[in-house]
Image (tube, rainbow, N blue to C red):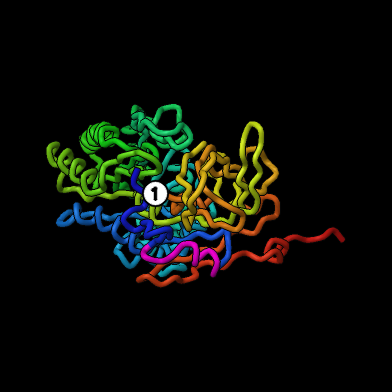
Amino acid sequence: MSLPGAPYLARQGVELRLDGCSLDALAREFGTPLYVYSQRAMLDAAAAYQRALVGRAHLLCYAMKANPSLAVLQTFLRAGCGFDIVSAGELERVLAAGGEASKVVFSGVGKTRAEMRRALQAGVRCFNVESQGELELLSQQAVAAGRTARVSLRVNPDVDAGTHPYISTGLKDNKFGIAHDQAVASYRRAASLPALQVVGIDCHIGSQITQVEPYLDALDRLLDLVEAVEAAGIPIHHIDVGGGLGIQYAEEAPPQADELVTRLLQRIDARGHGHRELLMEPGRSLVGNAGVLLTEVLYLKPGAAKNFCIVDAAMNDLVRPAMYQAWMAIEPCRRRDGAAPAWDVVGPVCESGDWLGRGRELAVQPGDMLAVLSAGAYAMAMASNYNSRARAAEVMLVDGRPVMIRERERLEDLLARDRLLP
């Protein structure tokens, strides 16, 4: 099996290197747990989408929930991307990174009044609306603010993306989007409400999708609705096909981004919709294999039933294995000779669910550094302070040079907002 993250991640002799930088050396210089990202890998991932979109009206919106670090946002901003956000906090991050609200689409099933007001004031490109109630409330807030809210209805096409139930979003029993059979009526209502302007249609069927066919199925259902909505006299300017393209964690072989885009454009053209602007919202596929989590082996604890390799990273640093039973490759930063028994790689948190990998064959000793691969997406983004643990530092490799992009939290940071009783 090739290393997830190749060619940016490669073993040279005994050393595991990212963009030519020794991960063992980075772990010892900056401490652990430590997230390390390759900017080059991110830019190349975005370029794969953009190559296939040349000559087409489009906006590639990075789904920043995957990794909202400001330096990551800067990287995609400089590459010409817009942003897909799901909260007012994410909007503030885009603005802090130097982004423009006019290149932001605001998704999310539970937007609050305050978030709507802030997005209207900032001038976001459009709201991806997910329910009839949200339409009504957004109209009220836009009228009160003296603004026009541009809206795109997120439609639930009831298409199975073939992914984990927790990250499937396009089935009729998911909480997301407006039901397909209610979409035309919802568009009529949107067109009738004050201070709303219908500009597009949107769908997003899930995450870690490894086949093209679910996208094409969803696109056909979306285009059916475009035709029905325009027949009702409501013009649709853009089509937003969402994101969700998967990456390699183990032996998955998802389509390349340019292949996916080409197939989508062919279907759009074949059905006579090539004049419309295309929006896409990739997240994981832009950052997932651009990052690793580095952790130090603290103790080895052989047992009668299991062997435990206890490391200093935990489920508060990386929750994907505990939450999704996600398999992520784990590699020694410096390879050792000798026996490689099977270890459960676990952290210090007081939960039996605190594991990063099970049954991993590793030749390791206390003090060695391990790299958890494919950790650029939904990793640091989902970190917490459970067990009063400070969150990790983040480093980005820029032109082969490590740049600290987020300092490690200090214990005093964890207490800063607490207040004792009088």
Residue 92 appears in the rendering: no
As drawn, 404 above or below 60: below
**In percent of the image, x 26 and y 33: which residue is there?**
213
| Residue 194 against residue 182 in the figure, above or below | below
Most common SS among magenta residues: helix
179 relative to 331 in the view: left or right:
left
Residue 240 visible in this rendered orientation of the protein: yes
Q: Amino acid at mark 1?
A: Arg
> Quick check: is 100 in the magenta stretch?
no
**Depth check, front residue: 119 or 29:** 29
Residue 29 pos. (x, y %):
54, 70
- 380 horizontally vs 150: left or right: right
Please name the residue that numbered disc 1 is placed on: 284
Numbered label tally: 1
Quadrant in the rendering for residue 210: top left
Image quadrant assignment for residue 185 = top left
Q: Position of residue 175 (x, y in %)?
A: 47, 34
Task: Report the quarter where the C terminus lies.
Answer: bottom right
Q: Position of residue 266 (x, y in %)?
A: 15, 41
Q: Please report the bounds of the magenta region as a residue range.
A: 19-29
Near-viewer residue (395 or 67): 395
Element under disc 1: helix
Give the farthest residue toward the right: 422
Name the quadrant of the N terminus.
top left
x and y percentages locating residue 385 in the rendered image: 65, 54
Q: Does 28 lie within the magenta span?
A: yes
Asked if 103 appears above or below 232 in the picture, the reply is below
Residue at image x 34%, y 38%?
Answer: 252
**Residue plotted at (13% across, 42% down):** 269
* Quarter of image, res 399: bottom left
Q: Say left or right for 334 vs 204.
A: right
